[in-house]
Image (spheres, rainbow, N blue to C red):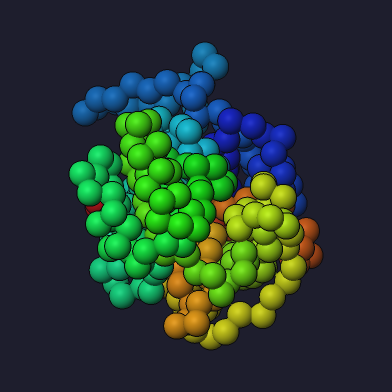
Amino acid sequence: MKIAILSRDGSLWSCKRLREAALARGHQVEIIDPLSCYMTIGSEASCVHYKGRRLPHYDAIIPRIGSAITFYGTAVLRQFELSGSYPLNESVAISRARDKLRSLQLLASKGVPLPITGMAHSPDDTSDLIRMVGGAPLVVKLVEGTQGIGVVLTETTQAAESVIDAFRGLNAHILVQEYIAESGGKDVRCLVVGDQVVAAIERQAKAGDFRSNLHRGGRARMVEISDQERALAITAAQTLGLEVAGVDILRANRGPLVMEVNASPGLEGIETTTGLDIATLMIRWIECQARPGYSPKMGG
């Protein structure tokens, strides 16, 4: 097959591993910077150009689109989808997952257990917003934040009000979420490929922090997950229409809770921790799913 990886940086671990895995299985691979793509769109002829040439038809596209370029990156991906290329994750599914409020609304509508969450932009009554989610301590997040950036644990009502007021001054959308103290700064990252959880790790926040992101100094170890956690991760990914996803689960006293679903999960932490070849599993999934005449789902 002819495969394109959409990424701004082909030297990143995930891109290199996916390229190596695809080449090892006999595929042709090209890494394309989506921001350098430009497109013609018309009823008779639409195409994607890159660095002065018209790109050929690809059997499959692997999107590794950073959150900062979601709008244009998914537009480029959608153009490939419309030409019949199979996407490992569809553009509409990536857009769903990147919109934190939209993803939580969809997950809640399917009965997926979540931390109690409030959403606001410029609340007139900050104290009422705090009461809605059970009061302090609580977590305040910027909707546009990634990798733990723009996430603050507030231990008192006064601190929560101060942080919310500060974020409100940024003209930003705010998520206010109950703090699951019993998780102890840990979460479980489940890597879903297709209809299976192919790997799981427990991430522990560094001392003095509650954010378990590995980019922020968190540590990881292999972990056994329950059948309930496995089913929950698969349901969360499928609810958002993702074929590959990193589903982050908190272990609460009332049972596992989905904290977030990542549409472009990094492979370095989970591959190095588990020793598993996740990249090859992703390529094998593409081999099973890619087919001539692919037609994208144009849902919301």
Q: Percent position (x, y) of residue 278?
A: 67, 61
Q: Nearer the viewer, residue 77 or 119?
A: 119
Q: Nearer the viewer, residue 283 or 273?
A: 273
Where is 228 relative to 237, above or below? below
Q: Percent position (x, y) of residue 198?
A: 62, 70
One can see residue 235 in this view: yes
Q: Percent position (x, y) of residue 286?
A: 54, 57
Residue depicted at 62% across the width and 35% down the height: 30
Residue depicted at 78% across the width and 58% down the height: 272
Q: Percent position (x, y) of residue 233?
A: 48, 71
Residue depicted at 68% across the width and 63% down the height: 204
Q: How many marks?
A: 0
In this image, 291 relative to 28: left or right?
left
Based on the displayed image, in which of its 4 quarters is residue 29 positioned?
Answer: top right
Where is 277 relative to 15, above or below? below
Q: Nearer the viewer, residue 100 or 139?
A: 139
One can see residue 83 in this view: no
Q: Nearer the viewer, residue 45 or 274?
A: 274
In this image, 119 relative to 229: left or right?
left
Pick out the residue farthest to the front.
158
Residue depicted at 66% across the width and 68% down the height: 202
In this image, 46 relative to 242: left or right?
left
